[in-house]
Every structure is written in structure tokens, then in C-alpha cells.
Image (spheres, coloured by chain):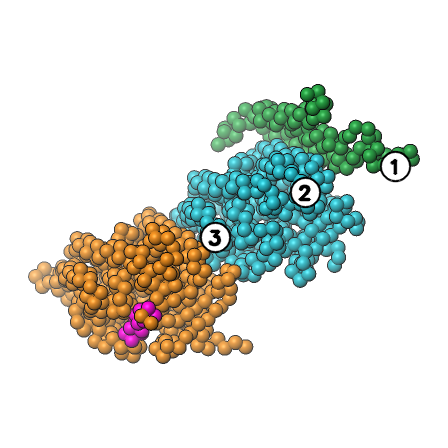
Amino acid sequence: MELFLAEKGIYFLTLLLLGVGLAGIIVCSNYMKKLICMNIMQVAVIFFFLCLGQKAGGTIPVAMDSMINAADYINPLPHGLMLTAIVVSLGTTGVGLALLYRIKDRYGSIEEKDIIEREREKK
Amino acid sequence: MMNFLALEYRPLVAVALALTASILVYILGEHIHRNVREAITFVAAFLMAADVYSMIPSVISGEEIRLEVFSIVKGISLAFNVDAAGMIFGFVASTLWILTSLYSVGYMRGHDEKNQTGYYAAFAMCLCATMGICFAANLLTFFIFFEVLTVATYPLVVHYRDEKGKASGHKYLAYTLISGQIFFAAIVIIYVFTGTMDFVPGGFVATDALPMPWACVVFFMMVGAGIVKAGVMPLHSWLPAAMVAPTPVSALLHAVAVVKAGAFCTLRVVLYVFGPEAAKACHGAEILAWMAVLTILISSLIAIRKNNLKARLAYSTVGQLSYIVLGICILNPLAATGALYHIIAHAFLKITLFMCAGAIFVTTHKADITDMVGIGRRMPLTMLAFTLASVGIAGFPFFAGFVSKANIIMGAVEAGKPIYAATLVVSALLAVVYLMPVISIAFRRDVVNPEFSEYGEANWRMLVPLLITAVIAIVFGCAPNLGFHLYDIATMAGNSIFGALTM
Amino acid sequence: MKNLPILIVLLPLVAAQLCLVFSRIHRNVGRWLVITAVSASLVMSVMQLLNVIKDGPIHYYFGNYRAPIGIEFSIDTVNGIMLILVCVIGLLTFLFSSEFRVSSDKTIVGGMNTVLCLLITGLLGMTSTGDVFNLYVFLEITSLSAYCLIAMGGNKGVIAAYRYMLVGTVAATLYLLGVAVLYANTGTLNMADMAVLLNEGDKNKAMLLAMILFIAAFGIKMALFPFHGWQPAAYTHAETSARPLISGVMGKIPAYAMFRYLFCVYGTDFKYFDFILDVLGVLSVCAMLYGSIRAMGQKDMRKLLAYSSVAQIGYISLGFAIGTPLALAGAFLHMFGHAFMKAGLFFCVGAIVYRYGKFSLEDVGRLYKKMPITCGLLVLAALSMVGIPPAVGFFSKWYLGLAAAREAKWIYLAVLVISSLLNAVYFFRLIEKFFINPDKGLPQKRERGRIEASAWILIPVIVCFVAILALGLCNAKIVDVLLLTLGEVGL
């Protein structure tokens, strides 16, 4: 059990984080909170990827003279990929914030309740 | 350089002519003088008729006219094949296009109709589709033109753009589109089970190709499209509803293109796809024949009660079309010949009746039979044509209707189905009952409606076509083979279907 | 010639960046720059397709690093045609959008052209790539530009864009999670390599998990029922001049990506393959029925067309669900055809908005007299949607129906028939509104274009008109070309 948790537990934690993010997007009524939850979700997947690259006894993948075996290093590819994913998530968040700014500008609120009310009034 | 006048290109030319006319009229219609616009229709109509007539000698000599244009879907070509049955329908449609066009000019101008450009364009499109239906060599080609016809007729039905037209349009679309889509599914099924689509006289579906109850289901899925358009009961109710359209459209619907396309579809499905054996084995033909019998009787009874002249004629059409369906379903060479010949006979007779109704309506604005007292004295020629056509519909000798009915009756007797023969006789009497009152009212001496004194005979543009069709109906009754050898062609078609079986 | 695959994607990408700068000089300089770039991509895509037909699939390796290490673009006949499709619709959208003054500020106009061009870049990249992570990056480029374009469509557009952004990011995240699962099991990101490695050993459970994530992710992106929630609002409120591109091709490329995973990466050896296809089939059937039924009640043209898209996407995934080469060919034919139909319909909507500023079906009575060409396309596209020959919609339905019948999946055939009839109900209603309803005597918004909308709007309309007919009549050729690839995807 302990071994299982030590080996796989981290995956469950990331999945939990993913669940929290997803639930937050659905449940929260404040658009800002939704955006934050979206970010949590993205981070969860980034963690998940990074965990895949880990292994016992490996070190950061910077070449050192004393270590010439691949087994001595952790897998660098997930880190490279996640660097890209982080950039993408930054972009998404940026667009999201810009949209939020617009919504606040035009509707005067970023609460879902108020916005729906506003839309109904216009009809 | 391909020779587009070569024999095998002629069916394609017929389709292309009407299509070109339709497009030209639609694009240029509003920008050119109306005489030029109508000239386009006439040129196309005459060229098409000449084109179709020119193929008759080859059909009689048994020469094959086959053209595969290109591959329309993977494995199947858009193909035309001129055979005897298609020739009959093609002859009727192309001949009547000239006459209805002339009549349309008189009617539409006399009535000052709106949207005339759209009307002529849609009319030409219908003819294009009809030509495709006549000469289609396989089910898919047939279906393509069949659907085009469905859609092209819609603007004609809703011509007046009012609420009533809209309702009829809905009804028309509901009936034809649903049956068309089911037809589509059936084509797919047939193709999967038999691997072929080409029409073969005598059919290509083996009796055991489909498991038993399903064979009948597929049979009706296919025939359904045909009998909806042909107005076999209980699927007929769009036809009287479509009466709101202008009279030339009714003439087109009832005599030339649409209902005949339905009857022709039934013919192709029963005798060229399933074939007599399979149609008999799955009991489809028998059920369909009984439906036709009921339709013939019930529609005649309804027609008696209708006071609106066009409605009465509409129900008469429903009944007459079922003659064709019945003739097909007797599954006998004589009856099939009669059914094919009835396509011609009914076309000329019924179009005469409709043209008369339209001429009366445009000239006197009367649509109800009871208002037409004494009209025969003011419009003697119109009513003469009407009388002749009525007698012909009832199936008197020396009229085209007699030739076809005699053949169907003989076929029924030969096939040992005297009930079918009796139905035809009874129905002929009923036809007398529902058409003769019109004539007797029109020629009544005692009460002369003073209103009529200001009206004379109809405009020549309407009068000439209806007289021509009436005369043709008599000519084909006295000498069925005159000029075009149409009776021989019909016999050829009948023999080719059943001859293939006995061999 | 060797570098065609990358140039096709790279040119619009570079042009998009430069467009913002050049637009500061004059709004038209930037616009013509991107139009030139997309046209060049179009020409190159055509050349590339001809090459592929002649010599077989092209594999392009970035920096000459071979497949599992480097990133690969792989072009076969299917995505070769899709590249052309994206370029054509993109180009038409650019021509079309030139008549719409989004703003008087030339930076904003330049920005919009940039974003539109980026959307095209993303779609082209998603189509070409043979690398799963590369696909993610292009997916996000596509999505981000789409969010911007939808947000440009006014107040409601901003809300629609924000909601789409939340859902879209969830989709992208789920996709990334799926990639992580596959990567953990194979250690590769190259699709072809992954296909080989997945078949070694028993990885079926992990594959099933990943596939469920992919179906959810691409389902959201292509607006497959029940993941379509964002789509009607987004299509309705998107910026008018960008709508044809968004509605025409944006939903199709994720569908293609799904196809790549299902048939190129997984293949029939996957234990739960039939199960996945059945699930997809159920979703498609629901989509076809639900979309059509919802479309019936709409009064707003844009919403009607958006819901109809939900149904039409169902046709495409139905083709995947049947899964034979013929069905796939039908699905792709429908994809190409529907791109032109839907884009064409939205060009028409745009033309009407351009002249009259109205979206409601109640306002368009007898409009055919004033806009005959536009209404002509409208009718043709509507008939094609219903599946009336000889428009392309009929032929894709024919292949789908035939494939369903060959596999003895009669329910699919029945649903095809029912769905076409439901389509007929609302498309004939649409036609009726344009041709039969009384004239409302709408005031014109603009003086220009007395008989029709202006030429830049009419060109896309006419091109779509021709394309719908041409695709229909040449479908046998297209299917032959498609089958060059589809015949060998394992089925």
C-alpha cells in the first residue's frame, strides 16, 4: 500500500487537482474564478506530464562528464513539452483576461447571474 | 471533336435543351422582352420534340441508344438508354411541352399573372427532369432526375405565394420528399443486395434475393415514390391540394410530367427492377393492384361530388392514373401495353380537359360547374373539345382512351382477373356520370346566364392548343399507329418485358 | 518543391505577423499581404496534392531529424485536399471581409486580419502535422484566434467567446492528458511510430482511456453532440466577416484529427475499437436528430444554421462510426461539401446583413427579387443540405447510406433518411421565408450595390455555388483520390 502510494500516489494527486479545476469551472459563478480554475486544470496536466519524466536515481538532464549513461538522467522531453504548454496556457489566460476586461466593460459585472440578467433585459 | 448530334447523344441533348432554356429564362427573364423570353421556351420545346421524334425509328428497329455520360458516383454512371417505354413517355412530354407553352402564354397573359419568369424557368426545369426520367438507364440516374422534378415542381405549386399556396406546397413537399427519401433508402438496399442498378426489361431482382417479408417492404419502399406522385390512394391528397396553382401548372402536373413520372416510376420499379416474377413472388403487385382498384372506384365517386371543375378533374386524374398502375400490376404483356398506351391517351385527353377549364376560368372567371350554365353557347369550340375529351376519358371507341382500356381489360381477362376488368368497366360508367353533367349544364338552353353575353370564345393562344390535343386524342384512337408507331412501341415494350421471361 | 509542406503553413504564419506592422501604413497593405500569402499557400497545396496523387504520401521531417526524434508533417490525399479546402475558404473569407469595416482604426482592422490569418495557419498546421504534441500547439493557435474573432462580434460575442474559451481550454487540456497517457505507454510523440508501438503488448486499457479523452476533446472542438453547447452562441455572435471560415472549416479539422487517431494511430487491432465506433455512432445519431430538431424552432438565420451544423457534424462522425473506406470517403466528401454549403450560407447571411442589417427570418420576405444571386446560392446550399441531387449533399449521403447498408447497420440508414427529412423541414421553411413571405420593404443600409451586394461579397457566393455543384458532379473522382489513402488505413 505504501509502495503503491509512493509510486502512484502523485498521479492521484494530480488527477485530484484536475478534478478540482474542472469542478470549479462548472460550479463557480464568478467568471474570474472560472478562469482561475481553468488555470488549475492546466497546471494539473502539466504536473502529470512532469511526473512521467521522473525516475528514481536520475538527475536533471544537463550533461556532466562523470555521467554518460542515459539512465543517470531524467527524461527531458516532458519538461520541454511542458515549457510549451505553459506558454500556451499563458496565452490562453491572457486572452481570457482580455475578454474578462471587455465583459466588465460592457456588462458592468463578471458575475454569471448579472450577465444573464443583462442579456434578458436587452431582449 | 465529338459529334453531339450522333444518335447516342440525343437523350442527353433533350435534357440539356430544357436545362439551358430554364437557366436562360431564369437569368435573362426579367431583363428581356417577354416575347423573347417565351421564344426561348418555344425554340427549346420544338428542338426537343424534334430530337425525341428523331429517335423513334431507331427504337422501332430495336437499335440500342445508350450513353454513359460520366461516373456519377463510384461504380455507377450517369447513363441514358432509350427504350420503348421511355420513348412513349418522352414523346408525350416533349409534344405536350410545345402545346402547354403556347397555352401558358395565353393563360398567363390573359390572367396577368405575376412571377412569370420563375414560372417559365421552373416549367422548363420540370421538362428537363422529365426527359431525364424517360431516358434514365439506371436507378440512380432515375432518382436524381426524380428528385429534381420534385423540387422543380414546388415553385409552380406555390406560384401565387399566398397562404393557400403555402399550405399546398407543404403538403406536396411532405408527400413527395418523404416518399423520395424512402425511395433513396430502397435504392441503396437494392444495390447492396444485387450489385447492379441498370434497368432490365423483366427485372433484375431475383425472387430469392431478399428474405420474404423484406422483399415486399422494399418493393413498397420503392413503389411508394411512384404511387405518391401518381396519386394512388391513400397517398393522393397532395394532388387535389395542388389545384391552387395556375391551370397550365395543373395541366402539367396532371397530364404531362409529375403524375406521369409517378406512373412511369411504378412501371420501371415493377417491371424493370423487380420484374414480373419477383413482383408476384413478394405479393407486392397483387396488393398494389388492389390499391389501384379501390382508388379507381373511390376517386370516381368523390369526383361526382365535386363542384369545382378543376377539383373534379383532379379526382378524375387520380382514378385514371390508377388504370396505369393497375395495368402494370396485372403483369401481363397486353395489360402492360395498355398501361403504356394509357400514358399517351390520358395525357392528351386530360390536358384537353384542363386547358378547357383554364380557358373558361380566364375568359369568364368561373370555376364552379353550377355557374357554367349555358356557357357552351358562348364558347362552342372550347366546350366541343371538352365534350370530345370527356367521351374519350370515359373510354368510348374511336378515342385514344378506348385503345388503352381495351388492352388492359383484355390483359386482365387473359390473366384470369375478371374483377379488374369489371372495375374498369364500372369506372368508365362513373366517368360518364361525373363528366356528362358538366356538358349538359354548359349546353342547357332554358336558363341563360346574362353575364355570359359579354364573353366570347377564349383567346386563340389557349384555343388552338386545346383543339390540337383533342384532335390528336381522336387520331390516336382511330389509328393508334399513325405517324409515330406509338402502339407498336408500346407493344414492343410489353413484349420485351415478358418475352425475356418466356425465353 | 521539397519544402512545400512547411511552406504552406509557414507563409500565412509569417504574413500574419507582418500584417499587423504593415496595416499601420494603410489598412489595405496588410490585407493584401495576407491574401497573397494565403493564395500562395493555395497554389502550393494544389501542387502538393498533385504530387501526392502521383508519387504517394509525403513525409516531411523538420530540420531533417528523422521521424521519432524530429517533428514530422505527413501529407496524404485526404489532408492534401483538406489543405486546399482551408485555403480556399480562408481566401474567400478574406475577400468577403474586405467589405466589412470592422473599425475605423486601422490597427484593429490589421489585428483582425492577423487573427484571421492565424486561424488559417492553425487549421493548416493541424491538418498537416504527424506529431501529437505539434497538433496540440496548432489546436491552441486555432482556438485562441477563434476566441478573438468571436469576441469581435459585439457584446454577446464577448460572452460567447468567453464561454467557448473555458470549454475549449478544457478540451485542449483533456487532449493533453490523453497525449500524456499515450506518451507514458509508448515514449513517442510521432503518430506513425505510436501506431506501431501501441500494437506491441497489451495496452488496451490505457488506449481506451486516452481514446475517451480524445473523443471528449475533439467532440468539444468539432461541436459533436453532446459537447456542442458552446457552438450555437459562438457561431451566432461571431464577427460577421469571419463567420464563414469559423463555421465552414473550424469544426471539420478536429474531426479530421479524430479520424487520424481512430484509424491511423489506433486501427482495428485495438481491442475496444468496435465499442468506440458504436459510441461514436450513438453520438452521431443523437447529433443528427437533435441538431435538426433544434434548428426547426429558430427564428434567427444564424442560429438556425448553427444548429444545422450540429446535425451535419453528426453525418461526418457517422461516417467514422461505420468505419469502412467507403463510409470514410463519404464522411470526407461531406466534410468538403458541407464546408462550402455552410460557408456559402453564411456568405449569404453576410450579404444580407451587409445590405439590410437583419438576421431575423421574419424580415427577409421576397428578398430574392432584390438579391437574386445570393438567394440562388441560398436555395442550392439548402437543397444540398437536404440531400437533393445533383448537389454534393446527396452524394455524400449516398456513400454513407451505401456503406451503412453494406455493413447491415440499418439504423444508420434509417437515421440518414429521417435526418434529411428533418433538414427539409427547416430548410424549406427558410426558402419559404425568402421566396413566399410578403415583402417587408426593408430600408437599405448602404447605397452601394443597387441590385446585389458588392462584388467582393458576390465572388465568394458564386465560388461556393460552383463548388457545391462541381463537388457533386465530380464526386467519383474525389472519392477515387480519397480512397488512395483510405483504402489502406487498416480497413
Residue denoted by label 2: C200
Could you tell me residue B43's position as x and y percent?
40, 72
Q: Chain of mark 3?
A: C
Name the residue: 34% across, 53% down: B212
- As drawn, C433 above or below B376: above
- Which type of secondary structure does the marked residue at label 1 adopt? loop
Mark 1 vs mark 3: tell me if same chain: no
Chain B: drawing colour: orange
Q: Residues within 10 Å of mark 2 (few under 14, many from 20)?
A: few
Q: Chain of mark 2?
A: C
Tell me if residue B494 is in the magenta stretch. yes
- Quadrant location of the N terminus of chain B? bottom right
Chain C: drawing colour: cyan
Q: Give left or right: position of B316 versus C374.
A: left
Farthest residue, direction left: B446
Residue denoted by label 3: C406
Could you tell me residue C269's position as x and y percent?
60, 45
Closer to the observer: label 2 or label 3? 2
Residue denoted by label 1: A68
Name the residue: 31% across, 63% down: B276
Farthest residue, direction front: C201
Name the residue: 48% across, 52% down: C406
Query: Separation of disc 2 and disc 3 at Cα?
Result: 32 Å
Q: Which residues are magenta?
A: B486-501
- Counting residues from the start of the chain, the first of labels 2 and 3 encountered is 2
Query: Separation of disc 2 and disc 1 at Cα?
Result: 29 Å
Chain A: drawing colour: green
Q: Chain of mark 1?
A: A
